[in-house]
Amino acid sequence: MIDIAVMASGGGTDFQSIIDAVESGEIDVRIVLLVTNDPDAYCIERAKKHGIDYHVIDHKGKTRREHEEEIIQIFDEYEPDLIVLAGYMRILTDHFVDRYFGKMINIHPALLPLFGGPGMYGEHVHRAVLNSGMKVSGCSVHFVTNEVDMGPIIAQRCVPVKYDDDIDSLSERVLEEEHRLLPKVVGAFGEGRIKLKDEKAYMMPKKDN
């Protein structure tokens, strides 16, 4: 069983999807830590409810490097095998990303490599999809690299873009798939089924018993 740490900045519904998958026995990992940069984030209440350690590391009044060094100190204490960015709303420095390359993943509410990069988060992503005329959207889980949203893609799920969609309806449909996809990727990582090869990522199928 691996230990995972989750980083989140808001409501934490993706965080909750991992909690639910762990508690139902769907995946065999241990959530040892939540790190958030927002002392008012609702994800803290989710951690409290489920007995998960949490640390609030506010970024205000600090340089990015200072803020990240505080997070690194916490990670050094807990030694997670995997770090999951689940709605963490800060771009991480090269120093931080390089330290955890290959053991840090992110969920993005669009089909990468389209609709990614700086500024592409939340409603901005869904507005861009709707404005593009794309007939499908979805979500992507990828390894985190120094290029925002451009790390090796591990897995994706698609949803239709309907003729009467607005930002809210499309966002809700994508979020439902995020809640299905993210725990599966975390579980696969715990089983050693995520492989990196030639700067590409693959989620290998489960072996028959």
Image (cartoon, rainbow, N blue to C red):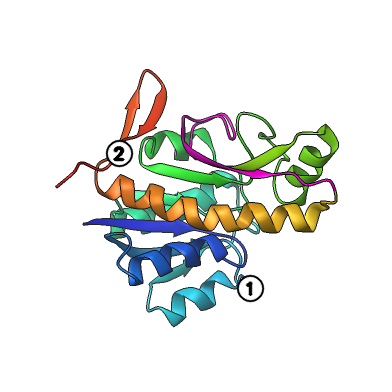
Tell me the crowding category of disc 1: few under 14, some 14 to 19, or many 20 or more residues within 10 angstroms, Cα based: few
Q: Nearer the viewer, mark 2 or mark 1?
A: 2
| Residue 40's disc number | 1
Residue 176, quarter of the rendered image: bottom right
Question: Can residue 141 be seen?
Answer: no
Observer-nearest of 209 and 83: 209
- Seen at 59% across and 73% down, the residue is 42
Residue farthest left in this picture: 209
| Residue 205's disc number | 2
Question: Can residue 145 be seen?
Answer: yes
Amino acid at dot 2? Pro
- Seen at 46% across and 52% down, the residue is 182
**Secondary structure beneath label 1:** loop
Query: Is residue 150 inside the magenta stretch?
Result: yes
Residue 126 falls left or right of residue 113? right
Residue 118 falls left or right of residue 85? right
Query: Is residue 122 inside the magenta stretch?
Result: no
- Does residue 135 sit above or below 177 in this rendering? above
- Seen at 61% across and 53% down, the residue is 62
**Secondary structure beneath label 2:** loop
Observer-nearest of 157 and 199: 157
Q: Which residues are magenta?
A: 141-163
How far, Cα to Cα, is label 2 from label 1? 39 Å
Q: Residue 140: x percent and y percent?
A: 54, 41
Q: Residue 190: x percent and y percent?
A: 28, 50
Q: Residue 85: x percent and y percent?
A: 50, 51
Amino acid at dot 1? Asp
Q: Earlier in the sequence, mark 2 or mark 1?
A: 1
Q: Quadrant of the N terminus?
A: bottom left
- Does residue 66 sit above or below 130 in this rendering? below
Q: Residue 91: x percent and y percent?
A: 60, 43
Residue farthest bottom in this picture: 49
